[in-house]
Amino acid sequence: MSRLIVISNRVSTGGGAQGGLAVALNAALREKGGIWFGWSGQRTDQFTGHINLQREDGVTSATIDLEDQDIDEYYNGYANRTLWPLFHYRIDLAEYERDFAGGYQRANERFAETALPLIEPGDIVWVQDYHMFPLGAELRKRGIENRVGFFLHIPWPPRRLLTTLPEARALVETMLAYDVIGFQTREWLDSFCDYACDEMGATLAEDGTLALAERRVRLVACPIGIDADAFAALAASRRASDAYERVRASLVGRALIVGVDRLDYSKGLEERFLGYERFLADNPNERKEVVLLQIAPPSRGTVESYQRIRTALEGLAGRINGAHAGLDWVPIRYVNQGYERDVLAGVYRASRIGLVTPLRDGMNLVAKEYVAAQNPEDPGVLILSRFAGAAEQMTDALIVNPHSAEEISDAIGVALTMPREERRRRWQGLIEGVRHEDVMWWLDAFTAQLTLAPNAHAKSAVRHGGV
Ligand code: GDG
C-alpha cells in the first residue's frame, strides 16, 4: 500500500482536542503510514530548512520554522490578506502586493525543498488548501514523479473576481501540476473550470479531466464531512451534559439560538446580528423568549480587517443589548473565547436553533456538528446560509440569504414555532447525509481518486516541464 504524505500549512498530530479533519488525517496516516509535513507555527531568525521530526500516537509529523519575513508575506500577507478575502468574494478587502506574492512563492519553494527528501517513490502526496497552491509545481520542478493531489477547503471565486488578482494565471498554471484537484462543491469546481477554459483555453472532458496543452488534471467535487458518530458521542458525554445543564438553567425556559464561528468577516456575523435584531423588532411578544449565544473565538488578530470586524461586532452587540435588554434578560450573549469541543457539543444540543449564516464558506463544519449533536427525539432546527458549501448537501435545513435581515428574522420565527414532527423529519434527512458523507468518506473518496489517477508524471509517461 502507498504511504500518504500530507502537506498543509499547519500540522495537527498527537493528542488533545482535535477537529474532525485532524482526526481523520491522523487515522489515515496511521493506517497507510506516512508523514504530515508543514509549518511548526514557530519563527526562526534565519531559515535553515531544519526538519523537526516527531512520532506521536503512531503518526510522524515533520515541521519547519519560518523567518519573520515569510510569516509576514506568506502567511499573514498573501494567504490571509490576499487570497482569503478574494476567494471569499471580498475584493474590497483583498490586498495585492508584489512582496506578498513573492514571499508566498518563496515559502512554497522552501516547503518543497525541505519536503522533497521525505517523499519516496510510490508515496501519494496530498497538499491541503490555499496556502500551498504552487507546491505541487515546485515539487515537480524538483523531479517528483509521484501522484500529487490538492484539496481546496475554501471556495473558488468566480472568474471575473479572480481576474483582479495579478498572479491569477500563473497560480492556475501551477495547479495543472497536480493529478487531482478536489473542491468542496460543484459550484467551486465550475468556477475553476470557467477560469481555466475561458481565460486560458483549457477544455473539460465528460469524466472531469481538464486538459491544457500536454497537461491533464482530474477535477472532483468532494465535500468534506465530520466524524459524525464521534461528535454524537461527544454530545452525550459527561462534560457535554454539564454544559447542557448549565446553559439550560441560565435560560429559565427561553429558547436558545446558537452561533459558533471563528471571528472572521466571511462568517456573516454582523448580518446575523442585524437579522436577529430584526426578529426582536418584528416580534415584540416573543422577543423576551429567546437568547442568541454567539461564540466567536478571535482569529488572525494581527490582520487589520480582523481587528475591524471585532470592533464592529462589539459595537453592534452593545447597541442591540442596550436597546432591548431588561432587568432579567439580555438578547445577545457575545462570547469572544473558544471552548473545548465537548462543551460546544453540549451547547449545540441545548440550542433550539443553530444559526449558520456565512456570506461565503467553502463548506462549514459547524452546520454538520450542530446536526450531529442533536437529541433525535427533540432536535433543534438548522438555519443555513445558501452561500455555505454545506447548503448543497443540507437541503433539509431552513435555507436563507444571509444578506437579508428579513429572511433571517422570518426563519427564526419559523424555527421557533416548528412542530416537533417537522423538526424530526428535517433532522432525519440531515443526519443521514452527515453520517453517510462523513470525514472518512471524504478522505477515502479523495485518496481513491488520487490512487486511480493515471500517473502522467511517471518517467515512462509524457514529461511536462515546470511552470
Ligand atoms: C475552513 C473553511 C471548511 C469553532 N469555535 C470553536 C471551535 N470551532 C471549530 C468548529 C469547527 C471548526 O472550528 C470551524 O470549521 P468551519 O468549517 O466552520 O470553518 P473554517 O475554520 O473557516 O474552516 C470551511 C473547513 O475549512 C474544512 O474544510 O468547512 O468552509 O473555511 O469544527 O467546531 N472548536 C473549539 N472551540 C471553539 O470555540 N474546540
Image (cartoon, grey):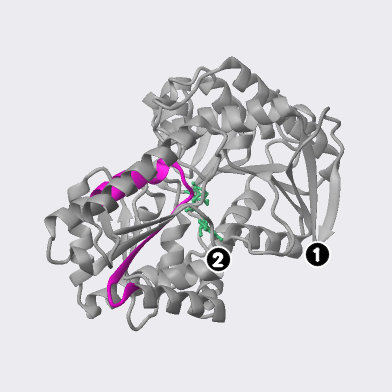
| Element at label 2 | helix
The residue where tag 1 is placed is: 58
| Element at label 1 | loop
Is 62 above or below relative to 166? below
Is 325 above or below relative to 10? below
* Quadrant hosting residue 384: bottom left
Q: Which residue sits at x=46%, y=32%?
A: 305
Q: Amino acid at mark 1?
A: Gly
The residue where tag 2 is placed is: 341
Q: Does the rendering let one see residue 396?
A: no
Q: Amino acid at mark 2?
A: Arg
Percent x, y of residue 422: 23, 75
User: Does ligand 1 reach within 8 Å of label 2's beta carbon?
Assistant: yes
Camera-side residue: 202 or 15? 15
Residues packed near mark 1 inside 10 Å, few (<14), some (14 to 19) or many (20 plus): some
Q: Which residues are magenta?
A: 251-275
State which tag comes first along the sequence, 2 or 1: 1
